[in-house]
Image (cartoon, coloured by chain):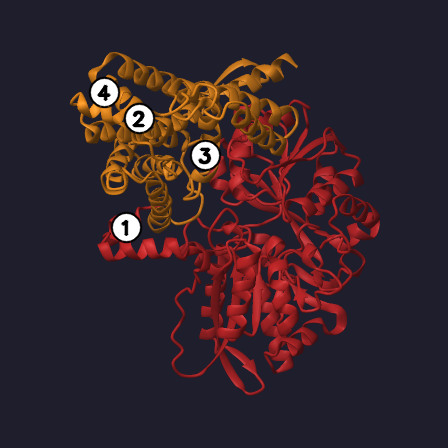
Amino acid sequence: MVELLAQTGLNAIYAASYMSLVAVGLVLIFGVMGVINFAHGELYMLGAYAVVGLYADFQMPFIFAIAVGLVFVGVVGLGMERALFRPLRDNPLGGLVASIGFLMVLQALAVMGFGVRMEHVPPVTQEVIVFSEKVRLAVPRLFVIIAAVVLLTALWVFLKKTRFGWALRASAQDPEAAALQGISINQTSRIAMFIGAGLAGIAGALTAPLVSVNPYMGHSVIITAFIVIIVGGIGSLEGAVIAAVAYAFIHTIVTTFWDGVIANIVGLSLMLAVLIVKPTGLFGATDRA
Amino acid sequence: MLIKMLKNGLTRRKLLGATAVAVGSAATVSLLPKAAFAAGKVIKIGFLAPLTGPVSAWGKPGLDGCEIWADWINAAGGIKLADGNYMVEFVAYDNEYDPAKARTGATKLIREEGVSFVMMLGGDTWPGAQPVADKTGMLFSTLLPSDLAPDTTTLIAPTEVHPIYNVTGVEWLAENKPDLKTAVMCAQDDALGLPSVATYLAAFEAEGIEMLAEPLLFDPATTDFAPVVTKLLANNPQIFCLDTCYSDYVHPICEQLFQQGYKGQIISCTADFYEQMIEKTSVEFMEGFIFQFPDFDDPALNADFINFKDPNKFYEEYNKRHPGEWGAVSWEYASIMDLWKAAAEKAGSAEPADVLAAMKEGGKGQHAFGTADWWGKDLFGIDNALVGDWPVVVIEGGKARIKGFKSIPEWYAKHGDLLKKHMAAYGQMWDQRT
């Protein structure tokens, strides 16, 4: 039983890691720009395909493929901000609808470029850290965990200690007041979108060797991400991380000791309970302004 | 797979076209390039299967195999009916393994394309197409005999015997590795997974192999299989059964088994693209992996009793046209076409009723793996499955090899009651299905 719990804990930490990256990216975009990006799962998918193209097809080093994936998806995010969200800044519903359309475009492009079948990504390494006979952590999963910790810590430092970070937080808190203080809303939106999309992209890139890469892989990720940010509080980065960890642990434990369908029900029930008791989420502010 | 749009160039026209495709994807008809038979008579055959999505591994490779079959048949003069020779042409519709799309596709293929026969994967999509079959009297085929019922009079399962053939793998396992006595199993919770679970349970029980836990039915949306594998390995099984998991699940589950240190026996219905699984794990880890689908370069398929023309050449041609894409169904739909063609030529007609009567005349048929019986009344309520021997395939030294052929009717004669018991427990008997 101890070994089972330990292995379950390792599984949960991995799940929490990539989910935190995706959820924090989504929260950052909403927090600064006030738009729900339904194409966020497809940004995760793009990051995975960056690894498919560069690492699997062209045999580039994995670390290079990840770095390019982050930048590439970040740039796609910049394109989304400029072409979709900025023109619809005063119309959040329009931005949401536009993101839904864009997710279909991204899926279609992935189908055209790579086909619809599961892509094979060779393992980065087959090394496994063996804690005991039944408690093991594959090194590629460790990469995801380390990357999540490093990136989220870096993001925290960026937001708390840098001028750009203060500008982002000010824009999220009160865009009009921020603008009056001389903060460029366009610039903060671009930064938020690049970082938010980049986080989703790197989550996809890191998990590409570990999951079935296909054009529709963003579906399950975005649903879980929405549950996490609703529970954590839309607009709260700390809430997203805490909720991702909590959700990952609950989901993994329930899956291991009962089954995955019950785990999904529990996750959705948790979201429902939070919405009833505290509609703004566990760490959400009472309103965005 | 190289990025096609870099090779072909991404123009704005293509981008807009892609957008239109994406927006209308729910109603998109996948009409693959047809041979231009400007002169001469043509018989159209409908191919209604998932060509995209997570189940596409059991649709698209089959269509690719059919194209080879069509080229060979047309080069040899086509299909000879009473009123002359006909070229054959396949018309595909991607049902994305969705019953509503299957219904739309069936209607389009029959009413607009005028096909003479419709081949399907079946499973969850058959209930969508059945009303169309019933209304039109069109002859349909399925890869899943578990779709059959007394009222499916125009549905046949002439090639694949899913899930019943899975008993052959377990029977071979018990004969050759009698010390393996405990098992666990997982499957996706759908029309492909559930009847196969019942079949494996019956097969394990017949061989005295103990199930250490209830079969784990995971959500088809699962992407991280670590918790699933951890849960099942906690039982310390000697056998890990992957049931009829899609290839999108078989690969990550096997990888997790490898990473979590499993060293026991693995048995599965399929092992599509097993070379990729070996790359993700190791030759040693995959040694002895048992499944049900041979590579057609297997020398065992050159035996006299095999009823598939030039299997080795077919495999070579397939790999030439679609390198690395050979899968479980690459040959199956072509094999169904062999049966259909023989029946149509015997009847002198492509009319569904005539072909069906010719196909079932005498109660026997030339299945790909030998002479087989039209069978199934006891289990499905109708004798519309062509059932005989089926190969047991084992991966050895990184290559899949047939280890023998086992008789399904013989197994059923001994253990049929067990199978019916487990099928009923999972609600998979024909009279329990809605």
Residue B268 location in percent, x, y?
A: 62, 41
Q: Are marks 3 and 2 in contact (CB under 8 Å)?
A: no
* Dot 2: chain letter: A
Assess whether mark 2 and mark 1 are in contact (beta carbons under 8 angstroms): no
Residue A168 placement: quadrant: top left
> Residue shown at 57%/67% (left/top)?
B118
According to the picture, the residue beneath numbered tag 3 turns out to be A221
Q: Which chain is red?
A: B
Chain letter behind tag 4: A
Vertical side of A202 occupied by B47: above or below: below
Which residue carries the number 1 mark? B5
- Closest to the camera, between mark 1 and mark 3, is 3
User: Mark 1 to mark 2: distance in Å?
Assistant: 24 Å
- With respect to residue B290, does B385 lie above or below? below
N-terminal of the pair, mark 2 or mark 4, is 2
Q: Nearer the viewer, residue A263 or B238?
A: A263
Q: Which mark is residue B222?
A: none
Co-location on one chain, circles 1 and 3: no
Checking the image for residue A63, the label placed there is: 2
- Residue at 64% x, 73% y: name it: B137
Where disc 2 sits, the SS reads helix
| Screen quadrant of the C terminus of chain B | bottom right
Left or right: residue B127 versus residue A196 is right
Looking at marks 4 and 3 on the same chain, the residue that comes earlier in the sequence is marked by 4
Q: Secondary structure at mark 4?
A: helix
Give the left or right position of residue A211, taking residue B400 as reference.
Answer: left
The amino acid type, in three-letter code, at marker 3 is: Val
**Amino acid type, mark 2:** Ile
Q: How many residues crowd mark 3 within 10 Å: few (<14), some (14–19), many (20+)?
A: many
Q: Residue A201 location in percent, x, y?
A: 34, 32
User: In front: mark 1 or mark 4?
Assistant: 4
User: Which residue is disc 4 drawn over?
Assistant: A167
